[in-house]
Image: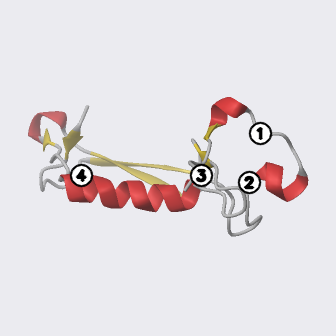
Amino acid sequence: MNLSPGGHEPVAQLTWRGGKRKAWLYRIDLAKPKRTPTLAQERALDRAMAARQTCPECGRRYFHCLRLRSVGSCEECFDGTPADPGSYIAPTAA
């Protein structure tokens, strides 16, 4: 709904998985519209996501985050599993 709590306290809390997971619930009538990020903030977020989505070996930027900490590359570079061409953006020639 593109709303933020607007400084108000939550009115309820949902818990599941034995209380390990929580979600706070807020009143919609007291919520305020989300702030629009600046262009610099959007650029910073895109750089951060690019770091998580780009394979360091082949340079492809995927539309999902890669398991860089555990695997270190995309699945195709790691074990040869072919990647769907619709799931990434091919690297540009530098």
Q: Are marks 2 and 1 in contact (CB under 8 Å)?
A: yes
Q: Decide which of 65, 11 is in the foreground and name it.
A: 65
How did the renderer colour the structure? Answer: secondary structure
- The circle drawn on residue 65 is 3
Return the residue found at the far front. 94
Residue 24 percent across, percent down from the top left: 34, 50
- Around disc 4, counting alpha carbons within 10 Å, would you say few (fewer than 14), some (14 to 19), or many (20 or more)? few
Q: Earlier in the sequence, mark 1 or mark 3?
A: 3
For the N terminus, give its image quadrant: top left
- Per the image, the residue denoted by label 4 is 10
Classify mark 1: helix, strand or loop.
loop
- Per the image, the residue denoted by label 1 is 83
Which residue is at a point 72% across and 62% down the rendered structure image? 57
Q: Given the image, on which type of amino acid does mark 2 rest?
A: Cys
- Around disc 2, counting alpha carbons within 10 Å, would you say few (fewer than 14), some (14 to 19), or many (20 or more)? many
- Per the image, the residue denoted by label 2 is 74
Which residue is at a point 52% across and 62% down the rendered structure image? 51
Q: Is residue 2 left or right of residue 21?
A: left
Residue 36 percent across, percent down from the top left: 17, 46
Residue 35 percent across, percent down from the top left: 15, 48
Q: Given the image, on which type of amino acid does mark 3 rest?
A: Cys
Q: Earlier in the sequence, mark 4 or mark 1?
A: 4
Asked if residue 20 can be seen in this view, the reply is no
